[in-house]
Image: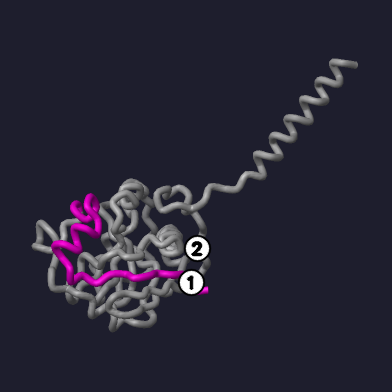
Amino acid sequence: MKMFRSVFLFSVVAALAVSVASAQPAAKPSLKSPASLKEQAPAVFKASFETSAGAFVIEVHRDWAPKGADRFYNLVKNGFFDNGRFFRVLSGFMAQFGINGDPAVQAAWRDARITDDPVKEGNKKGYITFATGGPNTRTTQVFINYGDNASLDSQGFAPFGKVITGMNVVEKLYAGYGDGPPSGKGPAQNLIQSQGNAYLEKDFPKLDFVKKATIEQ
């Protein structure tokens, strides 16, 4: 009888422990923990960007590039782009952004890569695409095409959305600094990564920036 009672009590305690463990809340999403930002994006959604140059809205279509759409959705929803600079704006070509102004946050995303999506839509004017450093290297940087850059399609750059309002704002983002090294004397990406906005505010104060990016409800 004592053995039965001991086994019974052990079973009750074990069940209670499992119940308590299952009741623990899931890890809270954090910009310093890319693994915690894994929501699947809606089939179609809009992201509003309030910037120093004005406002624009991007409409994302998940079926164009699912992995890219999911990553962008999580970045916008959790404030990754807020206060980030448009650090590479090349007239007639594109406007690039997506390096967080806080080096500690950016460091967490350095190796948070997503694999490539097949290219289903072309890099046309107003379309937004992840920048890459080669196959399967997309992390957080994106660019908006200023023209029809069809040559990027065959290189694996897969657009996931397009600007539906405010393209005139995108086209007036400050482009006076040009490209970064080694092609030009504009912002150096390695220094943005390591020093964040402090570097850009000191050496490239005219850059436009995202005040706030939000998912439209």
Residue 9, horizontal then vertical, whole percent: 80, 25
Q: Residue at x 20, y 70 (%)?
A: 207
Query: Which quadrant does the N terminus fall into?
Result: top right
Q: Which residue is nearer to you in this view: 159 or 107? A: 107
Residue 136: tell me if it is visible.
Answer: no
Q: Quadrant of residue 210?
A: bottom left
Q: Which mark is drawn over residue 41?
A: 2
Residue 76, horizontal then vertical, whole percent: 42, 64
Q: Residue at x 18, y 76 (%)?
A: 92
Q: In which quarter of the image is residue 99?
A: bottom left
Within 10 Å of disc 1 (Cα), the crowding (few <14, some 14-19, many 20+) is some
Q: Which residue is nearer to you in this view: 180 or 17? A: 17
Residue 42 within the segment the image draws in magenta: no
Q: Which residue is drawn at 50% across and 63% down?
A: 41
Count up the numbered dots.
Answer: 2
Lateral position of residue 136 relative to residue 185, left or right: right
Residue 211, horizontal then vertical, whole percent: 34, 70
SS at badge 1: strand
Report the span colored magenta: 190-217
Labels 1 and 2 touching (C-beta < 8 A): yes
Residue type indicated by callout 2? Ala
Residue type indicated by callout 1? Phe
- Position of residue 136 relative to residue 123, above or below, is above
Q: Which mark is drawn over residue 45?
A: 1
